Each structure stands twice: as structure tokens, then as C-alpha cells.
Image: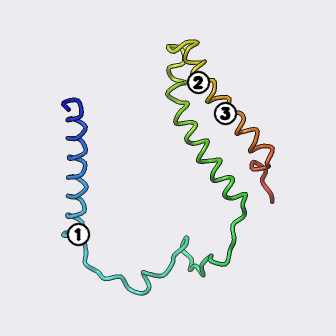
């Protein structure tokens, strides 16, 4: 239990800081009730008539998913790439299935046309 004590202390301090900030903003912040004008949708300095009728293409979602997947891959690959020389061949063989999976996924996305941009 002694090994987890610093982590518990860190979480408690973080929770106290968050609670303190919420309390301070509610006590010290302005008490202006929102007006009808403030509650209207606002988009880049112009009034928005809403986008409820606009249906997004499936390619938009494919691109978003691809971005998230590649983002997670970079987060996982960066520490390995930094220590690749120290880990040697065993590190490469450990990472090989993951790298192969990335390449297979990239080829699949490429063949499906997720990386093609239409004008």
C-alpha cells in the first residue's frame, strides 16, 4: 500500500485544486444572467442558421477515424522509437506485430479510398 500512497496523494491534491478553482470562479465571477442574444449559436463572427439539415459524408468519418488511429499509433510508437537502439533486436521483434498491423491497416484504408480527396 505504501507504493500507492504518492499516487493517492497526487489525486487528492489535483481534486482539491479543481474544487478550489470551481469554488473560486463561482464566488468571484460575474453574476450576469445569460441573455437571449448570448444563447444564440455563433459561428466565426457570423450568425449561424444551423447545420441540422446537412448530412456529412461517410468519408468525413473515415478520415476522422483514420486521424484518431494514426494519432494513437504515434503516441505508442514514439517511446519505442526513442529507445530502439537500447532495446535491440528483441525490441524490434516485440514491436513487429504492431508495425505489421499498422501497415495492413494503412493498405486497407488506401484501397478503400479513405485517403482520396474529392473536389
Under circle 1, the secondary element is helix
Q: Position of residue 61 (x, y in %)?
A: 66, 57
- Tell which circle, 1 or 2, labels the residue nearer the N-terminal end: 1
Instruction: Answer with the quarter of the image where residue 90 lies.
Output: top right
Q: Earlier in the sequence, mark 1 or mark 3?
A: 1
110 over 26 or under it: above or below: above
Mark 3 vs mark 2: which is more N-terminal? 2
The local secondary structure at tag 2 comes to helix
Q: Quadrant of the N terminus?
A: top left
Image coordinates of residue 23 in percent, x first then y, are 20, 64
Within-10-Å neighbours for mark 3: few <14, some 14–19, many 20+: few
Tell me the SS state at disc 3. Answer: helix
Which residue occupies 23% across, 69% down?
A: 26
Q: Is residue 66 left or right of residue 37?
A: right
Q: Residues within 10 Å of mark 2 (few under 14, many from 20)?
A: some
Q: Residue at x 55, y 73 (%)?
A: 43
Camera-side mark, 1 or 2: 2
* Tag shown at residue 95: 2
Question: Does the CB distance between marks 1 and 3 fall below 8 Å?
Answer: no
**Image quadrant occupied by the C terminus:** bottom right
Q: Circle 1 is placed at which residue position?
A: 26
User: Which mark is in front, 1 or 3?
Assistant: 3
Report which residue position mark 3 lands on: 101
Amino acid at each position: 500500500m505504501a507504493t500507492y500512497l504518492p499516487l493517492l496523494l497526487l489525486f487528492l491534491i489535483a481534486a482539491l485544486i479543481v474544487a478550489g478553482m470551481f469554488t473560486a470562479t463561482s464566488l468571484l465571477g460575474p453574476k450576469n444572467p445569460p441573455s437571449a442574444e448570448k444563447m444564440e449559436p455563433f459561428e466565426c463572427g457570423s450568425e449561424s442558421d444551423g447545420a441540422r439539415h446537412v448530412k456529412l459524408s461517410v468519408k468525413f468519418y473515415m478520415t476522422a477515424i483514420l486521424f484518431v488511429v494514426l494519432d494513437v499509433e504515434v503516441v505508442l510508437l514514439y517511446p519505442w522509437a526513442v529507445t530502439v537502439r537500447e532495446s535491440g533486436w528483441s525490441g524490434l521483434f516485440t514491436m513487429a506485430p504492431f508495425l505489421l498491423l499498422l501497415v495492413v491497416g494503412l493498405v486497407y484504408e488506401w484501397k478503400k479510398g479513405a485517403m482520396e480527396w474529392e473536389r
